[in-house]
Image: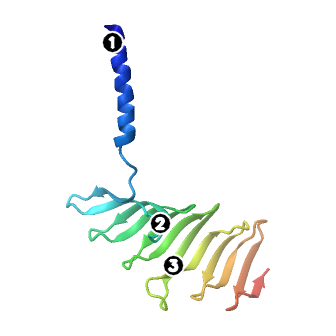
Amino acid sequence: MTETTIWTVFIAAIVSLIASRIWGPSVPRGKTILIEDPEGYARVELLAEPKGVSPGGMVGLRFLTKQGDHRVGLGMFENEGTLAFLDETGLPRLGIRMQGANPRIIFWQHLTTKIGIGMERIVLGLDPEGSHSLKFIHEDGTCRASIGTQKDGTAFLELFDANGKVVWKAP
């Protein structure tokens, strides 16, 4: 009797393991609604964007308005952690990011020449070379002013021309 019970439990465990491997739950891809508000509106989504969808490789959470518009996102894009606040057009306006080992706060502005595209305009953070800076960036993408401290603690203030060349520097 005991031997039969042991064999029954053993066989049941093996069958359960095989069945869970074959018919078990799959890993979700795309978007999954996690939370609806009391009125039934989807307010939080879990997402894993497939390749070919912009931004490709994005995984994380999206917080939605009652109309379903994405306004806040928290997640990973490639190797970069990010918290983004979007405007009514869906473009980011403020982002807090870890780019490599460099934390950054980025203020975005819409490009008037390219509808639906934004660009960095003000960046506060740690640069790859180790300086801490506040940078002001022109619509053409060039940094026009930078203030901060270098890795060794030396303060700096730099002004740049339209080509990105330093035109004034202190110290």
Of callouts 2 and 1, which one flags the residue occurring earlier in the amino acid sequence? 1
Q: Looking at the picture, does residue 8 appear above or below residue 92?
A: above
Going by the numbered disc 2, the residue's amino acid type is: Lys
> Number of numbered discs present?
3
Of callouts 1 and 3, which one flags the residue occurring earlier in the amino acid sequence? 1
Q: Position of residue 85 (x, y in %)?
A: 44, 70
| Occupied quadrant, residue 41 | bottom left
Going by the numbered disc 3, the residue's amino acid type is: Trp
Characterize the local packing of mark 2: few (<14), some (14-19) or many (20 or more) Cα atoms within 10 angstroms.
few
Q: Judge from the rendering whether residue 155 lies leftward or rightward of residue 140; answer left or right.
A: right
C-alpha gap between disc 2 and disc 1: 52 Å
Characterize the local packing of mark 1: few (<14), some (14-19) or many (20 or more) Cα atoms within 10 angstroms.
few
Give SS at disc 3. strand
Please state which of residues 19 and 70 is positioned toward the viewer in this rendering. 19
Name the residue tied to disc 3. 108
Q: Name the residue at 76% across, 84% down.
A: 169
Give SS at disc 2. loop
Q: Name the residue at 37% across, 15% down.
A: 6
Mark drawn on residue 4: 1
Mark drawn on residue 44: none
C-alpha gap between disc 3 and disc 2: 25 Å
Going by the numbered disc 1, the residue's amino acid type is: Thr
| Occupied quadrant, residue 35 | bottom left
Q: Name the residue at 71% across, 69% down.
A: 131
C-alpha gap between disc 1 and disc 3: 70 Å
Q: Name the residue at 43% across, 77% down.
A: 91
Name the residue tied to disc 2. 51
Quadrant assignment for the C terminus: bottom right
